Image (cartoon, helix red, strand yellow):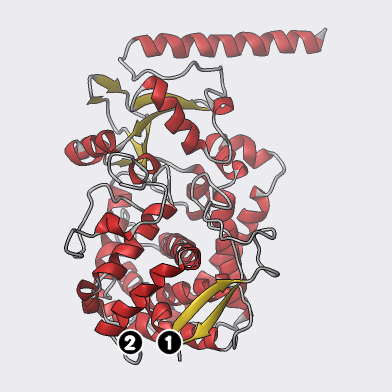
Amino acid sequence: MELSASLILAALIIALLWLLSRRNRKHVSLPRGPSVLPVIGNLLQLDRRAPFRTMLKLSESHGPVMTLYLGPQRAVVLVGYDAVKEALVDQADDFTGRGPIPFIIKVTKLGLCNGERWRQLRRFTLTTLRDFGMGRKGIEEWIQQESHHLVERIESTKGRPFDPTDFLSCTVSNVICCLVFGQRFSYDDDHFLSLLKIIAATLTFSSSPYGQLYNIFPRLMDRLPGPQHDVLANIDKLKEFIMKKIQEHQDMLDPSSHRDFIECFLTRLSEEKHMPTTEFHYENLVNTVLNLYLAGTETTSSTLRFALSVLIKYPKIQNMQQEIDNVIGQERCPHMEDRKSLPFTDAAFHDIQRLMDIVPMSIPHYALKDVSFRGYTIPKGTIIIPLLHSVLKGDKEWETPWSFNPQHFLDQNGNFKKNPAFIPFSAAKICQQFTAVETIRALNLYGGKDSVDLSPEQSSFANMPRKYMIIATPRL
């Protein structure tokens, strides 16, 4: 009897919530969308391994602006270049909010939040990284030095098959380490390698069905068994490493001379230590560094890994070596200023990023107020999902959207041209030094397939490329 009463009570509560949600929808002109189930919303209609594909399919029936419910969370999905551009460019002020991602907030205590706290830390971080040359020529020397280490490590394989995953992760991470910690680490440093595996596992979890469930039902997932607990425990190891590095910087800090991001933050922390409202305190330093480390390492190294798989699948594209030879030669290191003289190479790597489609649903935006858009009202508190997948693979914007095609970024004269639909989230040194990058049929990680599979191994929050073994043959 008690069990029956509990079930009846639960059913009544669910029905009441459902009626209230339907009642609230009548007071605003929401975009239309598929029918919704109580509590779980549209989750059962979405492909749990690639929800962006289902969203694209649903838009055929419900239009380029549609409402979905991810569990109890209302979301408006923008599909296609026109809708995404109109929202994020033409009405940019209305869509500046960043959607909360519970897993990222749990990990970094910062997440992609809004408000003055977020703006202060973001402004300081971007300014400091620019001062150290991020995105400018100042960082070029670090990248060049690290590329030498990468080439040496590849040469050490001496024609034997190898998985490039760890090499590329070390390379990318070391550039970030130079900016943040003021030092690089050996490719043979076991502790460094273990931290990189934690970062890779974190992004893999974020892109798994478990990770997406955590973002929809965070409180429930905190109480249920599952891999989320192992991931969060490993994040604590990353934080311990960061705190150790911060202490080392604190012990020998010279406020008049800054070598890296941590020293800049520590100086600002010292200057504002008596301000009760300051955001420059120890916990925010730890979490900001963690955010930088997590955000940059795996996404960039995965993109490079995908680039190599494209070069393997399309061997003719390696004719860009001729362009590299003509502009750079085989001896000197590439410079950023060479990019304008390498239009084909530039176009090739742009289309690699487009084809990879690394964050197909973008980082979610958030309605900070009621927003009027295309005759609809998007209520405050709604998640906005600009479906970048629909932009990067749009038939109207790209001649061959599902194929690798550098001509997407070249004009009739072979000059590089921009495409406004290129909205993604250089490996020329490798192509400069090595001729053949080929699959190993007996040892590949594709399950015995002869050809390279460019489809992602895992899709959801991010498209994760497949792993593979390669042989790099030095040029004669």
Along the horizontal axis of the image, is 3 left or right of 433? Answer: right
The residue under label 1 is 148
In this view, the residue in front, 111 or 95, is: 95
User: Which image quarter: residue 384?
Assistant: top left
User: Which image quarter: residue 281?
Assistant: bottom left
Mark drawn on residue 399: none
Q: Earlier in the sequence, mark 2 or mark 1?
A: 1
Mark 2–mark 1 CB contact (< 8 Å): yes
The relative height of residue 102 versus residue 332 in the rendered view (above or below) is: above
Q: Is residue 235 visible?
A: no
Residue type, mark 2 in image: Cys
The relative height of residue 5 versus residue 473 in the rendered view (above or below) is: above
Q: Position of residue 370 (x, y in %)?
A: 27, 25
The relative height of residue 206 versus residue 474 in the rendered view (above or below) is: above
Q: Position of residue 428 (x, y in %)?
A: 36, 76
Quarter of the rendering occupied by the N terminus? top right
Crowding at mark 1 (Cα within 10 Å: few <14, some 14-19, many 20+)? some
User: Which image quarter: residue 181?
Assistant: bottom left
Residue at 50% across / 73% down in the picture?
168
Q: In the orientation shown, which residue stands out farthest toward the right?
A: 1
Residue type, mark 1 in image: His
